[in-house]
Image (cartoon, rainbow, N blue to C red):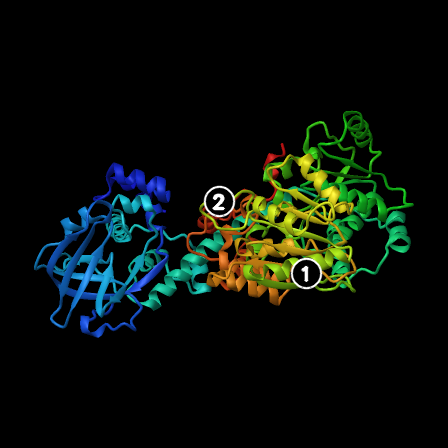
Amino acid sequence: MSSIFDKEIKFLPGVGEKRAQLFKSELNITTIGDLLYFFPYRYLDKSRLFKIREVGEDVTTFIQLRARVESIQVLGERNKKRFKVIVSDGTGRAELVWFKGINWVQKQIEQEREYIIFGKPGFFNGVMSIIHPEIESTLVAQNKFRPEVTGVYSVTEKLTSNHITSKVIFNIICTAWENVNGSVEETFPEHLMKDYGLMGLKEALYNIHFPKNNTLLNSARYRLKFEELLGIQLNILSVKKKQEISYKGFIFSNVGDIFNSFYKNNLKFPLTNAQKRVLKEIRLDFLNGKQMNRLLQGDVGSGKTLVALMSMLIAVDNGYQACIMAPTEILANQHLEYFSDFLLGLNVKVELLTGSTTKSERERILSSLAKGEIDIMIGTHALIEDRVVFNKLGYVIIDEQHRFGVEQRARLWMKNENVPHILVMTATPIPRTLAMTLYGDLDVSVIDELPPGRKPIKTIHFYDSHRLRMLGFVKNEIKKGRQVYIVYPLIKESEKMDYLNLEEGYDGITRAFPPPEFVTLVVHGKMKQSEKDYGMKMFKDGKANILLATSVIEVGVNVPNATVMVIESAERFGLAQLHQLRGRVGRGGEQSYCILMTSVKLSKESRKRMEAMVSTTDGFELAELDLQLRGAGDLQGTQQSGMAFELKIANLGKDGQILSIAREAAIRILEKDPLLNKTENGKLRVLARKYSADKIYDFSMIS
């Protein structure tokens, strides 16, 4: 791109040093290039001038007037001041009112002068008023370009308090475009633009800021979204190609005695078709001579852990060690119990290493591991310590991968001179578009069916006014010998958020379920890990009827006797988190329930989430809806997983089709030029680097 794009905005007329500092701190904009890639978040149609008499109380959209100032008044005192202007256009009168920035606005408005006014009308006692409208003298307006479709730019409170509004940003962008003076270097080769019918970059940047009509605006949007998503896909897929070229995988050709004996004698129930399909995909990876990098998605209870264990047995049959790293000690212990139970009678040595492992036990385990006497190593973060040395590590599994940082994960598979096969697992369903973006360099396997015989969890939405019904239902379940989770979004009461908190909840629950007849435990994130694990274990062992907790129990608790999950202030949680919490019950043979408690006053989005939770238990369906409602940036795990780049215009919840086309284009380009080394792809190489991200594993860390 032309060097003019690198020019600092402080040198632009109307900016200066002070404003430049604000642009940098508030919007991360320092150069003309940054400014031109700061796109409007919505657009207003200014193609029509209304007459005041045309605007009735049924008009709810923004309108534009041309009117003359009749009177100016400053009303009220100190913090309660307001600035009122009466305007007229010959057909009627309207009030313009400002509550903020009064001193600045006063200087812009003169008696008897005509202005172009833009804002959203409201009516009080039959009089039309516009609060905080945009206003511009007709003398100024006629001497500059005024597009019919006008972009609205995001501004922060600090920018507004310094009189940098959306309109000011637009004017500065106009100045920046004049400085560029047509010097926009195309980022796409000509053949790509022709193949996909794309608008040129210069034309796209112009029409994203100054569209003449909606047709040109839509073409500009498509081009810029395609560019962003293609850059991401080129980066991700070129990394994958490089890994395939650079790292050869261990070949596990033998499905031997251990696996076959397990399948014949130890498998307690038939595999689902989805489990069989995923095992076959992993098996093919083990045979193709390439290092496996696979993401295994599976809803809660779908049987991912069994697939992980069986694939580890293939590694063991071929003389290699395997390990699985879990985010919590309770989940690691759960894996040990599960593996030990399933492997009973087989010649497979399994050990557990966590922060709680005693010094003498740790020394014994580390010695055995280094000698190759341990086949399967289960652990927490303790596995990545430098002292943990494997003899022949061939296979690494990361459970609940979003709970680990990139560097932590990379350190585990750096335990080998040669990179082991890698499987990362998640019980959080990932929307297709997000998977293609965050994990586009991984092959994806999905277990999309539950084992037969498992009863679907019934989900009920209660308002706070139904609390007595909820408590009665819980008491009946406890009388049947069942256990109950009650989850809260906060530990202590917050003045800003009126959500039921855990401390207040504990008082209410212990009154409704008094000891010693009922035993209630509390677990939350601010407790020491040992205290949390102790509380979880007490509940798991059936020594408590009710576990009050924050969302720390979202992952890694398996209590088959727990049949009720009550989620207080459920509107506070995202869909993915609600679904994860719901998955803590329904693990035994009894019918299980999830009760969503909310206030009566719900936002439209919150109501949609509650309706979705009640209507479906399909985690993937819920994940797609969550992405549409909240966007990628707010979804759990995106930062940990490596979405280091910022999407400036594409929306993963809405632009799935463009993403698919961009991915297809990236695949076609890389098939002919895997590392983008050809001269004709020089521009695409630069584009890919622009969207380089901190990926789920980083092989550049390996010397």
Residue 313 position in % (x across, y down) = 82, 47
Q: Residue at x 44, y 58 (%)?
A: 225
* Residue wearing tag 1: 473
Estimate how packed mark 2 is, as few (under 14), some (14 to 19) or many (20 or more) residues with alpha carbons within 10 Å.
few
Q: Residue at x 65, y 47 (%)?
A: 510
Comparing marks 2 and 1, which lies closer to the viewer?
A: 1
What's the residue type where badge 2 is placed?
Ser
Residue 515 position in % (x across, y down) = 71, 45
Estimate how packed mark 1 is, as few (under 14), some (14 to 19) or many (20 or more) residues with alpha carbons within 10 Å.
few
Report the front residue among 401 and 121.
121
* Residue wearing tag 2: 494
Mark 2–mark 1 CB contact (< 8 Å): no
Which element type, helix, strand or loop, lies under badge 2?
A: loop
Report the front residue among 17 and 533.
533
Left or right: residue 183 versus residue 195 is left
Report the front residue among 620 and 120.
120
What's the residue type where badge 1 is placed?
Phe
